[in-house]
Image (tube, grey):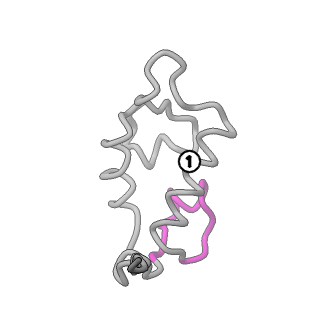
Amino acid sequence: MAKKSARKPNAKFMAPVQPDAALSAVVGEKPLPRTELTKKLWAYIKRKGLQDSKNKRQINADANLLPVFNGKKNVTMFEMTSLVNKHVS
């Protein structure tokens, strides 16, 4: 049986990105790959209980996430991704 080759991670996806000041309050100041940034962001959301209990796709902002979400009190998961991308370089 032919062995299935492991997926190669996309180099661009694994390249470290630098969070800005607003995002650093949530994920830390060090550059990290987008995959790690996403993991840290979700860990923060779960630890603080910011995922909406009725609609799991909604994320409620706390004081640290408000600047990242452009002042919006809650955003969808998909909105969150595009908003977070504006806070990395």
* Residue 23 is inside the magenta segment: yes
| 43 w.r.t. 21: above or below | above
Residue 73 position in % (x across, y down): 43, 29
Could you say whether the residue bearing mark 1 is in a helix, strand or loop? Answer: helix
Q: Quadrant of the N terminus?
A: bottom left
Asked if residue 74 lies left or right of residue 79, the reply is right
Residue 68 magenta: no
Position of the C terminus by quadrant: bottom left
**Identity, as a three-letter code, of the amino acid under mark 1:** Trp
Residue depicted at x 35% and y 60%: 85
Instruction: Give the magenta part as a residue range.
Output: 17-31
Name the residue that disc number 1 marks.
42
Neighbour class for label 1 at 10 Å: few (<14), some, many (≥20)?
Answer: some
Give how far across and how far down residue 46 sits, in percent. 63, 38
Which residue corresponds to the image point at 60% horizontal and 54% vertical from the top-left? 26
Please tell me whether residue 30 is drawn above or below residue 59 in the rendered image.
below
Most foreground residue, 66 or 35: 35
Give the residue at x 31% y 42%.
79
Q: Is residue 61 above or below residue 10?
A: above
